[in-house]
Image: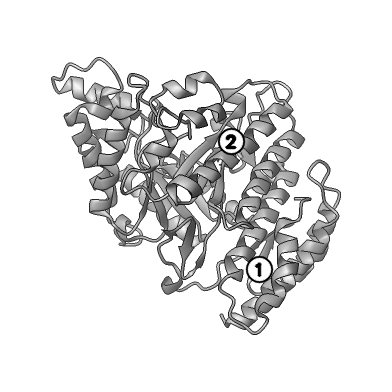
Amino acid sequence: MDTCKRCFILSLVFFMVFFEDLGTNVHGFQGEEQIETTVEDFLDHSPHFTTTQGMYDVEEVGDDDDDWQMVQAKGNQFVVNGQPFYVNGFNTYWLMVFAADQSTRGKVSELFQQASSVGLTVCRTWAFNDGQWRALQKSPLVYDEEVFKALDFVVSEAKKYKIRLILSLVNNWDAYGGKAQYVKWGNASGLNLTSDDEFFSHPTLRSYYKSHVKAVLNRVNTFTNITYKNDPTIFAWELMNEPRCTSDPSGDTLQSWIAEMAAYVKSLDAKHMVEIGLEGFYGPSAPARTQFNPNSYATQVGTDFIRNHQALGVDFASVHIYADSWISPTISDAHLEFTKSWMEAHIEDAEKYLGMPVIFSEFGVSRKDPGYNSSYRDTLISTVYKTLLNSTKKGGSGAGSLLWQLFPDGTDYMDDGYAIVLAKSPSTSNLISLHSTRVAIFNSRCSWKCRWGCRKKNSLETFLYHDDL
């Protein structure tokens, strides 16, 4: 698409959305009806914007493979095709398992369609299921081809909706097998392992993990015929979901594992980014920063945010946000205060010590929490989005966030309390969509080359950083 024409369309939409946005607020969304009419009327007549059920998004311009390139980390930003790529995304961990069953495969497509309709661009999901029901890896180096084909489908379907994937390679927890399953496999082979944390230290279990990494990265997708390690649909590889090694609170054991595995992934695939999957707890290497931890136990789980992310081969930082799990289950303003300070501390450290982007790759609130209501959930999401925009306007490391978690309708039986079903959550959907539009416009503005130049800067920034998100 012609650069100046793109500039013109994006400028029109930001003016329309900005003036409608002045009538909204986080708690009541009084302007929601206006956004669903006036802005929708404009967007429906633009070939590069779509609206779905009153929600709007900026489409990825250009459908050619030449436009679908690898996202890379450059300094404290993500970049693709020479322009920034700030992330508004989500988690849905069970996509591979649903895709393995023809009766539920359609839910994968439905989810991607709904996520795309509110402008979400990155999804984090599991590329593992070890030794469990409908396992991908039934035993070390033994795979169920039909389940692997299901993962192929997830990757190919994501691309159809212009959604990129963070693929996590193993779990710290028992769900979907995790490190405990690797220990079981080790003992079944004759080892005498007594702790699940030996996953990180025993050479045999390290070799099992490396074999799984190699199998996934070298997989040729049966739908697209593209090898995973060459597919730009994959945003990044995640070493592990929420690694902890409580048997060694010094952090040395986990640090050794991270260093070895990040280097190994890069040896197989130098094109894609790598992240660890950490929750973000501060450890012994930064005692002054442990004040930001949610509780004293967080310093004893063997992770160390700054030190861990200094390992060679790690491209960006990951942080999770669960005030309701870490501080108290009862909803309170203290949760919002913690969320803001937790994010600001990690953004500062990513800038000052790491020189890399940081993604808040899980955040949410459970409907099961005492005192929960949907207005509070919107306020929490708004707090995360606003904190990120405050970083963006300073050129900071706050590079995006991933909601935990997005579900299509009819999957309530998988809900852990955190699920967001867009069709049942209009105010939340509107909030997500508005942030997606802001992120998409910011991602585009830095590549505009037309004669308007810097004259558009002030009005654009007013829209991007307006407080009433």
Q: Position of residue 359 (x, y in %)?
A: 51, 46
Q: In the displayed image of the protein, which residue is found farthest to the front?
A: 288
Q: Secondary structure at mark 1?
A: strand
User: Which mark lies nearer to you, 1 or 2?
Assistant: 2
Q: Amino acid at mark 2?
A: Trp
Q: Horizontally, is 276 left or right of 35 in the view? A: left
Q: What residue is at 43 percent from the left and 28 percent from the top?
A: 283
Q: Residues within 10 Å of mark 1 (few under 14, many from 20)?
A: some
Q: What residue is at 82 percent from the left and 63 percent from the top?
A: 19
Residue holding disc 2: 342
> Is the residue under label 2 in contact with that under label 1 (CB below 8 Å)?
no
Q: Position of residue 413 (x, y in %)?
A: 56, 30
Q: Which quadrant would residue 324 be assigned to in this image?
A: top right
Residue holding disc 1: 49
Q: What residue is at 47 percent from the left and 63 percent from the top?
A: 79
Q: Secondary structure at mark 2?
A: helix
Q: How many marks?
A: 2
Q: Which quadrant would residue 249 be assigned to in this image?
A: top left
Q: From where the camera sits, is residue 134 visible?
A: yes
Q: Give the distance between the C-alpha atoms of the residues marked 1 and 2, in whole angstroms.
A: 35 Å
Q: Position of residue 350 (x, y in %)?
A: 48, 46
115 to 447, vertically: above or below: above
Q: What residue is at 55 percent from the left and 27 percent from the top?
A: 291
Q: Nearer the viewer, residue 124 or 249?
A: 249
Nearer the N terminus, badge 1 or badge 2? 1
